[in-house]
Amino acid sequence: MSTELEQFYEVFFEESSELLAEMEACLLGLDLSSPDPEDLNAIFRAAHSIKGGAGTFGFTDMTEMTHMLESLLDKLRKGEIEIRSEMIDTFLRAGDIIKGQLAAHRGDGAADEAAAAEVSNELKQFSEETTEALNIDKESTSSTTEQPDHKPNEAKNVVVESLPATSKTEQVSFNIEFSSSGINSKSLENLFSNLSDLGKFEKLLVSDKEQNCKLRLTTYTCEENIWEALAFVVNPSQLKIEKASQTEAHTSTKLDVSSSIQIDEITSDKPSKTAVETENSACEPYGFFSGAPAAPIETEKKVKTESHSDPSVEQNILEEKSFPTDTINSLPIQKQSKPNAPTTETTSIRVSIEKVDQMINLVGELVITQAMLAQTASEVDPVIYEKLNNGMNQLERNTRNLQEAVMSIRMLPISFVFSRYPRVVHDLASKLDKKVELKTVGEGTELDKGLIEKIADPLTHLVRNSLDHGIELPEKRIATGKVAKGTITLRAFHQGGSIVIEVGDDGAGLNREKIMAKATERGISIHEGMSDQEVWMLIFEPGFSTAEKVTDVSGRGVGMDVVKRNIKDMGGRIEIDSVQGVGTRITIRLPLTLAILDGLSVAVGDQMFIVPLTYITESLQIKNTDIKTVNGVGRVVHVRGDYLPVIALHEIFNIKPNATRIEDGILIILDAEGHKAAMFVDALIGQHQVVIKSLENNYRRVMGVSGATIMGDGKVALILDTTGLVMASHKDSL
Amino acid sequence: MGKTILTVDDSVSIRQMISFTLKGAGYEVTEAVDGQDALDKAQRETFNLVLTDINMPRMDGLKLLEKLRGLTPYKTIPILMLTTESCSEMKARGRDAGATGWLVKPFNPKSLLEIISQVTK
């Protein structure tokens, strides 16, 4: 179609992706035993909307798929057919196909045509099952109608060929002409097969040089059904459907006509004249209703006025009306009663991520400038420059607020990741014959967009792992006194400066003996004195897998080590808790954001370091008597009943300190994930909010340092990798 | 001043496309995301024409038609329905609800402008 439509493609792609996600969520949430009509409607509407858009923007492959999807869904929501779990699977796969087609239209890969054909076949089969069931009804009625006495009246004027036949008992030939340019051969094939479903079908001329298609279809169906079959493939403006002249028409038509002449007294079952009115118009891409408010006068001649004089027709319209309005009335009311019914209108705008990052960078610079100004201003007499000082305070507040606001742009709720797992769990559970329920807690927890993207794959792996290795088969669960349905819980929450994501299951738990045996087999060094925690961590070793049988789900022995590495690359940490027979919980801790942190600046010799504030519990000076030296452990300090290893920064970074003895300097007590240590520094300088500049990007990775920042006076200070230092001090002292 | 048109569709791409096409032809276009939104907007301002999709959440096009026809200023203005459902049943329902005419999806900008120009003459 028109090239000016292209500017709406991106909007359509985004919209369709959202609709597909919505559809998937609805499908997965559907209760098969008593499906909520509202859900079915929502799913139908999603397919319907995609179809409408795809048709308008000329993506015929998507139109075909959504059309099949829609017709089956329509039958479902009308209750003509019962929903079954296989259908859900097919729907989900159809959704995947449409996603693939979307991606292909976006220029990202190619659509899987074989899979598309397979899925559309399945959809068709489901649809046909219904129509077969319906046909039985129809056949029984049509067999009676064939007897002259019971045949419904087609009314005299139907026979007088001024009106197209609409009755199911009368066959009519149609000449169909359209241009096949721009239609690929596959779509054309599909089209032909759809048409041949409608009746006797002949190809008079297919794709000659002018790419014209001429077809003849002899069918019981009415013209608009043909129109509908064609409209999604063929540009309606290039489509012509004509009733073939009587001589061309099939002889059976005449037979039917003659038999219907005999019985013109009986009232019609179908409002044939209303059909006429709409039927004529079905060939048009648009039209007007006669007598409707504001309808243009010239169109009135299109419509047979006699349709209103026929009382039977009027009655039929009323009857028809009574059915739909009932259903329609009930829908919006139900919908409105749902308080947070999602509407398609969102109040968000799409901005490229570069713009946001640029803004974050600029705010970072602003924070630095503000700090510099604050430092300069602090040197002047506060009494004389009171106004300046007030201004500086306000500037600091505003800068901080601005910074928080800008940072929050990059933050997304973790539901963006969590929302994909219902599908993962559904697919895998049915594959493994397991019964699993997925619970998500804290979907609203926000984290940096960059982390959201990176966490998805490791989390997927963990979820699949829990399902495959954790959750037992239903029989086994019942045998061990559990409910047949296992539960996988995804939980996210903030803790200090981190976001914590847990993947928990109520499955079999990890087996210490099995893991130990496997580790020995794999040549991983172990000893009997290892704590459970340490044993569990073995599963993250490269090449480790305890699954007796390698499945295509998990258990190829690659993955868990990759999961651990990915998490580590994000600056995060992973832990396992497990109790045999009760379940397993894997905890991931990630830094909340990667750009800015609150830190305490400390001095060692002439250097300044930043310690992230979240790790600091207290700072203190200590007496000589509290310092002990333990063989093989090094120095420890006795603080509030604990013996803590000492991290001497001047030793680690090889700096000449002002205070060489611990009792002359200051100890900062750090707590990194339950491990405590005391950091020995010369002096505390102050608290700052610092913008993290990556050391790796600008220099190289340095042990004990997580980044650098520019201070208010323009000097560079290193940000300490507190956790790394604390862990190292514990390793040294073990 | 151009004629004012209220276009109602839950699909943002279709809405934008209609809006763009109509604005290009000199109409003043207001968009609504569903029947309820349209009704709210129609009550605040009287449009010269309403173009509505049928299948929408919250309030569908047929209900909107009925409601609009119940409002005095909308008794005689053209209301067109835009629908993928080209079957006669849907059209009959549209007509009963008070539609002036229909436009079948998928449509091209040309037929959109044609039908609009016929009723806004």
Image (cartoon, rainbow, N blue to C red):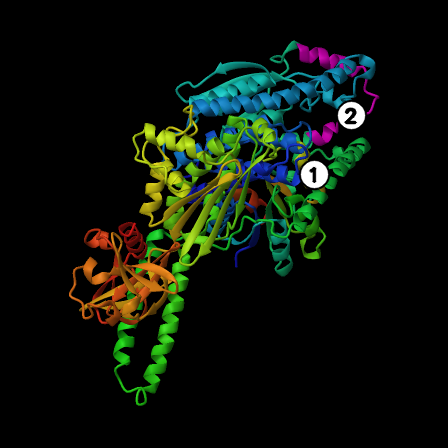
Q: Is residue B106 above or below residue B117?
A: above
Residue A191 forms part of the magenta stretch: no
The residue beneath circle 2 is: A269
Check the residue under mark 1 and report the chain it is in. Answer: B
Nearer to me, A471 or A520: A520
Mark 2, secondary structure of its residue = loop
* Residue A723 in view, yes or no: yes
**x, y percent for residue A187:** 47, 24
Mark 1, secondary structure of its residue = helix
How many tags in the picture? 2
Nearer to me, A694 or A637: A637
Badge 2 vs badge 1, beta-carbon distance below 8 Å: no
* Three-letter code, disc 2: Asp
Magenta region: which residues? A252-275
The residue beneath circle 1 is: B93
The N terminus of chain A lies in quadrant: top left
Nearer to me, A495 or A230: A495
Q: Quadrant of residue A295?
A: top right
Instruction: From the viewer's perspective, tell me whether residue A606 is left or right of residue A157.
Output: left
**Label 2 CA crowd tier, 10 Å (few <14, some 14–19, many 20+):** some
**x, y percent for residue A586:** 44, 43
Q: Which residue is rendered at x = 72% and y = 44% of the image?
A: A329
**x, y percent for residue A537:** 37, 40
Check the residue under mark 2 and report the chain it is in. Answer: A
Q: Residue furthest bottom?
A: A384
Q: Which residue is rendered at x = 81% and y = 14% of the image?
A: A262
Instruction: From the viewer's perspective, tell me whether residue B31 is left or right of residue A309.
Output: left
* Three-letter code, disc 1: Arg
Q: Quadrant of residue A639?
A: bottom left
* Residue A179 in view, yes or no: no
Nearer to me, A530 or A324: A530
- Residue A626 shows which numbered tag? none
